[in-house]
Image (cartoon, helix red, strand yellow):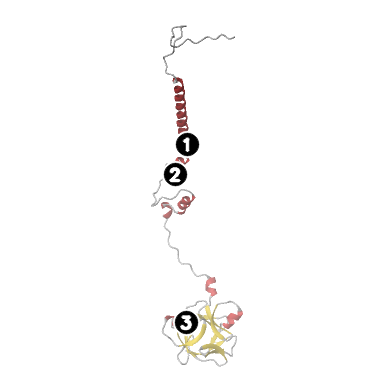
Amino acid sequence: MPHNTSRPPQDRPWEGGWAADTSRIPGTRRLWLAGALVLATVATCVTAIVVTRSPGDDPARSSSASTTAAPPGLISYASDSPSPSGPASESARTASPSPTESRPKHAKKPSAAPKPSATASASSPAPAPRPTATERSVRSVNFPDRGWQVSDGLVRLTGSPDTYTLRKGLAKPSCYSFTTADGRYLRHRDFVLRAERNDGSGLFAQDATFCARDAAHAGAVMLESVNYPGRFLRHKNFQLRLDPHQSSELYLADSAFRLS
């Protein structure tokens, strides 16, 4: 049977030599452990915050520092409104020239007007001399037995051509205007040649003015419109009209007329 030593009663500590420890408060060791644990936790949190908030790991701070800091030795120009950072601002910066680039280094003398080339002058017929007589009939080159005649207000090719009075051009004196025996003018409207009374308008004067050009056939002329350069009078289905210039043999024959 084990030998148990009984604890002496605390009301008589002098018996057996045992006495209670009254130098510390009960539970003090647990308080110290809890305090040490709290301090260690706080220190760990502070260290983690400091590490995560370091300048090298803050992309926003590093990006803002890189955009605001200008490299040494360059002059920066202030703009009226802040431009967004990124590819858009870079394209805007490259599109706008710098003050140095916008000002030419050397002033150049104005270049002389280009001389007309031989090709351009050859594309349009040369001016033909004005006839001396004023009363003329106009006959076709490829239909010599037909000439201009006014019928129902329109000008056609018929076997009995009318006689017209050649006058100075209403819109250009060096060109021609044709009048009938009753005082009407030949003018184009909707690109069709017709006889109408002069209404005194600028449009009528231009529509009734034609300039003579050398034709591909000897002794003939081509009649070019003043307000539609490059369009010449030609007959098509025996109807007189304005058509753009062509190099075909048919067009050159249809647009050639003899004033006789």
Amino acid type at mark 2: Thr
Separation of marks 2 and 3 at Cα, in angstroms: 68 Å
Whichever of labels 1 and 3 marks the residue nearer the N terminus, that label is 1
Q: Which of 37 and 214 is in front in this view?
A: 37
> Where's residue 115, x and y in %?
49, 68
Quarter of the image where the N terminus is located:
top right
Kindly identify which numbered label has been placed on residue 67.
2
User: Which residue corresponds to the image point at 46% horizontal and 25% vertical from the top-left?
Assistant: 34
Which residue carries the number 1 mark? 56
Q: Which of 153 and 255 is in front in this view?
A: 153
In which quarter of the view is residue 167 placed?
bottom left
Amino acid type at mark 1: Gly
In this rendering, the count of numbered labels is 3
* Rendered position, 184 above or below 30: below
> Where's residue 110, x and y in %?
43, 62
Amino acid type at mark 3: Asp
> Where's residue 191, x and y in %?
52, 81
User: Which residue corresponds to the image point at 42% horizontal and 55% vertical from the top-left?
Assistant: 102
